[in-house]
Image: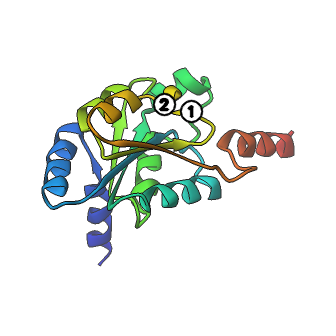
Amino acid sequence: MRNNLEQTLLDKITTLPQLQQTIAKWKSEGQKVVFTNGVFDLLHLGHVTYMAKAAELGDKLIIGLNTDASVKRLKGENRPVNDQSNRAALLASLFFIDAVVLFEDDTPRDLIAQLLPDVLVKGADYTVDQIAGAKEVLVNGGEVKTITLVEGYSSTSIINRIKAQTS
């Protein structure tokens, strides 16, 4: 039983070429594909709520996950706390996530342009014109949606609280 579960999780973590084939299959079956992305360093209630709401916007949810190198460039040398393998496995364990794909760039624009999901989702702290890949999705007939974030949750604030408690 355990090996089957581990394999199911590993099967959700995919490469761009594999994911492109999977998306083509999903779309041929009439499935609505949703995409969102992030670092998801320390998984918390804000992340889970956000991704669950994103999943409700379609039939299949893809998570674009920043690689460790990308996170270091964006967040600094001490990040991520959890490496990309751990972060990807945690995301894959969530039942409402159908695929996790890593990306190396600072933004997922090129990844989104290659996947062309039906719905692109980001937090409401972004406006549509600030969302990487929005133009490509809209030109392709897709939608771009924003989701209100749960107040008071961020990996950075959790890390800062831990540091304050250990100082």
Residue of label 2: 131
Residue 62 in percent (x, y) is at 35, 50
Image disc number at residue 127: 1
Q: Is residue 46 above or below residue 110?
A: below
Residue visible at 42% across and 58% down? 57
Q: Is residue 111 visible?
A: no
Left or right: 90 with respect to 5?
right
Count of residue discs:
2
Q: Are marks 1 and 2 in contact (CB under 8 Å)?
A: yes
Work out which quarter of the rendered image holds the N terminus and state it.
bottom left
Q: Nearer the viewer, residue 8 or 57?
A: 57
Q: Position of residue 31 (x, y in %)?
A: 24, 60
Q: Secondary structure at mark 1?
A: loop
The image position of residue 165, as x and y in percent, is 85, 46
| Residue 41 appears in the figure | yes
In which quadrant of the rendered image does the C terminus lie? top right
For the point 63% across and 54% down, which residue is it? 46
Q: For the point 76% across and 50% down, which residue is it?
A: 152
Cα separation, mark 1 vs mark 2, equals 7 Å
| Residue 114 numbered tag | none
Identify residue type, mark 2.
Answer: Ile
Q: Residues within 10 Å of mark 1 (few under 14, many from 20)?
A: few
Rendered location of residue 78, percent (x, y): 62, 29
Q: Residues within 10 Å of mark 2 (few under 14, many from 20)?
A: some
